[in-house]
Amino acid sequence: MTIILIVVTCLVSILCFTGRLDGNKLVFNAYSVWHRKEWYRLFSYGLVHGGWGHLFFNMLTLFFFGRVVEQYFILAFGNITGIILYVVLYVSAIAVSSIWDLVKYRDEWNYNAVGASGAVSAILFASILFEPKMGIYIYLIPIPVPGYIFAPLYLLYCWYMAKRNMDNIGHSAHFWGAVYGLVFPLVCRPEIFGHFLAQLGM
């Protein structure tokens, strides 16, 4: 299923890159969602990306961590239910991660956002919930950082950068997507938290 999500996202993004599909009709525009009731944009923007690098980084992250989460969901909930819940997590995370920005920028007609980063953050943090000691590489740092250390640092970074609001990156979507990635599996099966603690030797 992870591969299918990647293929669909890449296909739509590439069609937008080449002008065969009008990406402006798919992007997250807070004003259009709030005032024009174009609710589909809460989901469709996750299929559009700002460039090849943006698409590649998101899909590469999804490829590595999505397969981990998908397998754990299958183990926890069974083949069919596990895959369904995995897809629900990913798709719903696209919308959930943008709710903060929707409310904040609902009256700004020129606020747009694209990319699956919020959903990918959800998948990344769900994988940390299942394997908290899993090593995660950060940009140019050659030493992997354990997930349980990476997680709070990542959340603090996203919160700080969202507060500064000095670049063109949706840090709040990353933050809320990550939080959602922790909450969703626990709502589905609270016992997963016990597994998390056991992995840490607690």
Image: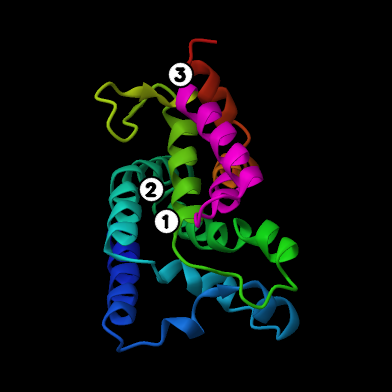
Instruction: Indicate the secondary structure of the residue bearing disc 3.
Output: helix
Between disc 3 and disc 1, whose residue precedes? 1
Q: Position of residue 65 (x, y in %)?
A: 35, 43
- The amino acid type of the residue labelled 3 equals Gln
Give me the residue at 27% from left, 32% from top.
140
Residue pointed to by mark 3: 199
The magenta segment is 149-177
Quadrant of the rendering where the C terminus is positioned:
top right
Between disc 2 and disc 1, whose residue precedes? 2
Q: Are marks 2 and 1 in contact (CB under 8 Å)?
A: yes
Q: Would you place residue 17 above or below residue 180 in this image? A: below
Give me the residue at 57% from left, 35% from top.
155
Mark linked to residue 83:
1
Left or right position of 67 against 78? left
Instruction: Indicate the secondary structure of the residue bearing disc 1.
Output: helix
Q: Would you place residue 152 above or below residue 120 in this image? A: above
Give me the residue at 35% from left, 54% from top.
58
Q: Position of residue 135 (x, y in %)?
A: 33, 25
Q: Mark 3: few, some, or many residues within 10 Å (few <14, many ≥20)?
A: some
Q: Mark 2: few, some, or many residues within 10 Å (few <14, many ≥20)?
A: many
How many marks are shown on the rendered structure? 3
Marks 3/1: CA–CA distance: 23 Å
Mark linked to residue 70:
2
Instruction: Indicate the secondary structure of the residue bearing disc 2.
Output: helix
Residues 82 and 8: in front is 8
Residue 20 seen by the camera: yes
Does residue 162 belong to the magenta stretch? yes
Q: Position of residue 120 (x, y in %)?
A: 44, 51
Q: Would you place residue 46 above or below residue 192 in this image? A: below
Q: Mark 1: few, some, or many residues within 10 Å (few <14, many ≥20)?
A: many
- The amino acid type of the residue labelled 1 equals Ile
